[in-house]
Image: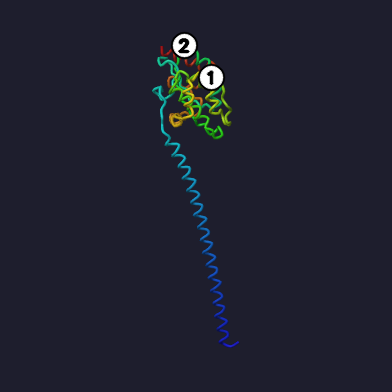
Amino acid sequence: MSKHDRLRAKAREVRLAQERAERRRKRIRIAIGAGSLVIVGLLVAIFAVVYTSASHDRTTASGVLVTPANLAASGAIPVGQTSAPVTVEIYLDYMCPACGKFEQANATELDRLLAAGTIKLELHPMNFLDSRSKGTNYSTRTANAVATTADQAADKVWVLSKALYANQPEEGTSGLTDQQIADLATTAGVPQATVDAFKNRTFDTWVTNSNDAAFKAGVQGTPTIKINGTHFEGDVYNAGPLTQAIEQAAGGAS
């Protein structure tokens, strides 16, 4: 091979090497570009999730706060004579099975003490068990019904509250339908106009605020019972201990 041919062959090898190098560079640029698109896509997806979540939180938190009429000074729903010497606060969630047990054990005695003018009740409805009703927000729906009744027909609050516990669904189910809640209220003597207002969900935000205020005040679960502001540490699932504590408080108040 002549020197000229060797030079041409060498030049051809160099050109082919350059072409191969350029092809590699293009593949690298394409790969980087594709990777960048994936990263951008992921960032967009993450942003969308965060934005959607934040938007949902803002929607929930920005619900108009309407406070029921006829509340106690503590902000709770009152039941009984304001002049009663003993105040019994009950922190409750209408989906809470333990609250149902408390109600079953103590409702008769609480009725007696209310009728005697010994106690007044202050109900603090909570909705932290909304997540246990398969997306139906049962705790909020029932608490809103009770709050609506407090606002418009305060003398029917306690009978409605008891009816909800007497027909309490199991935790983890969808709970009673809106119509079933309305039917219970009607049977309990709540006026039809008040029952019709349940569907407006006027007091949903107030219920959530009541729930949050309870936790901020140190409530750790339901039922939580306070007698004249003091946490009752006794047995709440059998009749007797709560009555005894109330009567002792009444004696001390006299």
Q: Position of residue 219 (x, y in %)?
A: 47, 28
> What label sits on residue 98 in the rendered view?
none
Q: Position of residue 36 (x, y in %)?
A: 50, 58
Label 2 near label 1: C-beta < 8 Å? no
Report the Cα–Cα distance between label 1 and label 2: 25 Å
Q: Residue at x 45, y 36 (%)?
A: 60
Q: Residues within 10 Å of mark 2 (few under 14, many from 20)?
A: few
Tell me the residue at 45%/42% (across/down): 55
- Front-lying residue, 215 or 64: 64
Assess disc 1: are there few (<14), some (14-19) or many (≥20) residues with their C-alpha within 10 Å of its C-alpha. Answer: few
Residue 72: quarter of image: top left
Dot 1: element: helix
Quadrant where the C terminus is found in the figure: top left
Q: Which residue is mark 1?
A: 187
Of residues 217 and 32, which is closer to you in this image? 32
The image's colour scheme reads rainbow
Quarter that holds the N terminus: bottom right
State the residue lying farthest toward the left: 73
135 up-or-down from 104: above or below: below
Q: Residue at x 51, y 25 (%)?
A: 223
Q: 233 or 129, which lies in front?
A: 129
| Amino acid type of the residue tagged 2 in the rendering | Ala
231 w.r.t. 37: above or below? above
Tag 2 secondary structure: loop
Residue 59's quadrant in the figure?
A: top left
Rendered view: 129 above or below 25: above
- On the image, numbered disc 2 is attached to which residue? 116
